[in-house]
Amino acid sequence: MKKRFILTVTFASVFLLSGCGSKKEEEEAKEEPKNAVEALQQFADKAKDMQNKEPVDPVDFRKLKELLPEKAAGLSRKEASGEKNGAMGFTISRAEARYSDESNTSVHVEIFDTGGVAGVATMALAAWTMADIDKETENGYEKTTKIEGYKGFEKYNNESKSGEINVLVADRFVVNVNGDNLTMDQLKSILADIDLDKLSDLK
């Protein structure tokens, strides 16, 4: 997990250190991207804008752990952990829990607080916030959506019965719920057990 954390902040720092463009370019970046190149430029420009925001120290990971449900879709919690790590000048708090049973049904829940990097790492952890996605195939779908008033992302595979739900709360907290051998409704019920409004109010 520490490798994942380092990769996350490294990814964020790449955008943080990207070159500055003209004011005209910044205004154009606010428009809808016409292709992948423009989308990437818009992503980078937003990261640069976030440099001007005041950093917020991430909350104690123990507060995040308190929001992890005891059970998930009827599955018992097997382990819960948390940490607050820093690298390259960034600090992120994270709490996670794993749930499973003997039928190979499993769930992994993560809550991140990226406040210490003023939103840059938020984009690294939740790049989908920069796009509007609506895709459907014979095997499943993925889409950006609204969940309890917050911007979210859903992805599900009908063949493997696996999926994920991701939510961005207060522009700093990222909640990830993913599982195997579960329906999307079950994943949504797990997310519903996490008090997102309480999460939003944490300081």
Image: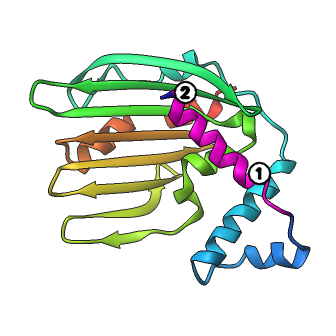
**Could you tell me residue 87's position as x and y percent?**
69, 30
Circle 1 sits in a helix, a strand or a loop, which is it? helix
Residue 176 % position (x, y): 44, 40
**Membership of 139 in magenta stretch:** no
Residue 171 seen in render: no
Q: Quadrant of residue 119?
A: top right
How packed mark 1 is, by other alpha carbons closer than 10 Å (few <14, some 14-19, many 20 or more), is many
Q: Is residue 145 left or right of residue 18?
A: left
Q: Is residue 94 above or below residue 43?
A: above
- Three-letter amino acid code at the position of disc 1: Leu
Specify the quadrant that holds the C terminus. Answer: top right
> Which dot marks residue 177?
none
Residue 168 visible in this rendered orientation of the protein: yes
Give the distance between the C-alpha atoms of the residues marked 2 and 1, in whole angstroms.
21 Å
The percent position of residue 89, horizontal first and vertical second, equals 77, 32
- The crowd level at tag 2 (other Cα within 10 Å; few <14, some 14-19, many 20+) is many
Q: Position of residue 73 (x, y in %)?
A: 23, 32
Task: Give the residue pinned by disc 1.
Answer: 16
Residue positioned most to the right: 23
Front residue of 16/170: it is 16
Which span is picked out in magenta? 2-19
Q: Residue at x 70, y 36 (%)?
A: 115
Give above or below for 144 relative to 80: below
Left or right for 54, reference 203: right
Q: Residue at x 15, y 24 (%)?
A: 101
The residue beneath circle 2 is: 94
Q: At 20% across and 47% down in the image, what residue appears?
A: 183
